[in-house]
């Protein structure tokens, strides 16, 4: 499942990089929780949680249905 998550993040990453941010995959747990680290401009952005939940999480769940949640660490 980790490879599928990496592939999905590769599709999301250009949008984040266009705004000076990035996302790094930290871990995919066996129970379907994806842990990511928001970097660059995304790390300190007040809209980071919206980006994480409405953007990254929604897209990853669509691409990899086994994902239960995406959290920032």
Image (tube, grey):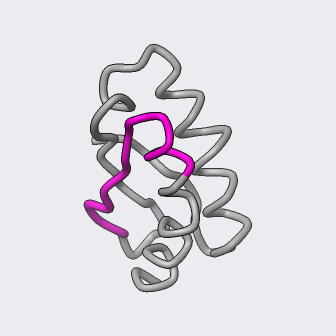
46 and 2: which is toward the camera: 46
Q: Using the rendered view, name the quadrant where residue 31 is placed.
A: bottom left
Q: Residue furthest top?
A: 46
Residue drawn at (60%, 39%), measured in percent from left and top?
A: 53
Q: What's the magenta region?
A: 15-28
Residue drawn at (35%, 54%), measured in percent from left and top?
A: 35
In the image, residue 2 sits, relative to residue 51, either above or below, namely: below
Measured from the top left, where is residue 44 in percent x and y? 32, 20
Image quadrant in which the C terminus is located: top left
Measured from the top left, where is residue 40 in percent x and y? 28, 35
- Using residue 40 as the reference point, say whether residue 32 is left or right of it: right
Measured from the top left, where is residue 23 in percent x and y? 37, 51
In the image, residue 70 sits, relative to residue 11, either above or below, namely: above
- Using residue 9 as the reference point, say whether residue 39 is left or right of it: left
Residue drawn at (67%, 38%), measured in percent from left and top?
A: 54
Q: Using the rendered view, name the quadrant where residue 55 is placed.
A: top right
Residue drawn at (59%, 28%), measured in percent from left and top?
A: 50
User: Was residue 22 drawn as part of the magenta stretch in this picture?
Assistant: yes
Q: Residue furthest front?
A: 18
7 and 57: which is toward the camera: 7
In the image, residue 8 sits, relative to residue 40, either above or below, namely: below
Measured from the top left, where is residue 51 in percent x and y? 57, 35
User: Was residue 21 drawn as part of the magenta stretch in this picture?
Assistant: yes
- Using residue 13 as the reference point, say whether residue 37 is left or right of it: left
- Count of numbered badges drawn on the protein: 0
């Amino acid at each position: 499942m980790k490879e599928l998550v990496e592939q999905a993040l590769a599709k999301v990453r250009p949008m984040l990089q266009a705004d000076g941010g990035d996302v790094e995959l930290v871990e995919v747990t066996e129970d379907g929780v994806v842990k990511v680290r928001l970097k660059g401009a995304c790390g300190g952005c007040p809209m980071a949680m919206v980006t994480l939940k409405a953007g990254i999480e929604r897209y990853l769940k669509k691409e990899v249905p086994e994902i239960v949640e995406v959290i920032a660490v």
